Image: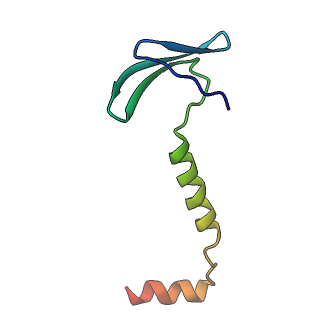
Amino acid sequence: MLVLSRKRGEEILIGDDIRISIVSIEGDRVRIGIDAPEKLEILRGELLDETRAMNRQAAHVPSLTLDELKKIIDKK
């Protein structure tokens, strides 16, 4: 991993078409701007990790037979 120090207003360039700008720094929060081609998907890491965990959890839900499902529906 490359670690760089930047000040507000400074930029990081990745290749020819991705530009990351430091927009502001307030306490322990840094706001960044990303200028990249629209076709490039940009995701927040913590949201991707959370989605993957939820998908793994959903994949482990036991399946129900039609009779079991009918009993659950009839109770409501």
Residue at x 52% of width, y 39% of height = 44
Please say if 58 is above or below 32: below
26 lies left or right of 67: left
The residue lying toward the viewer, choosing from 66 and 51, is: 51
Q: Determine the image quadrant of residue 40.
A: top right
Q: Quadrant of the C terminus?
A: bottom left
Q: Determine the image quadrant of residue 3.
A: top right
Please say if 6 is above or below 30: above
48 lies left or right of 23: right
Q: Quadrant of the N terminus?
A: top right
For this orientation, the residue located farthest to the front is 5
Residue 38 image point, x, y percent: 56, 20
The residue lying toward the viewer, choosing from 53 and 38, is: 53
Residue 17 image point, x, y percent: 62, 12
* Coloration of the structure image: rainbow
Residue at x 55% of width, y 42% of height = 45
For this orientation, the residue located farthest to the top is 16
Residue 39 image point, x, y percent: 61, 23
Please say if 44 is above or below 68: above
Residue at x 51% of width, y 13% of height = 11
The tally of labels here is 0
Residue at x 60% of width, y 54% of height = 52
The residue lying toward the viewer, choosing from 4 and 49, is: 4
Residue 4 image point, x, y percent: 57, 23
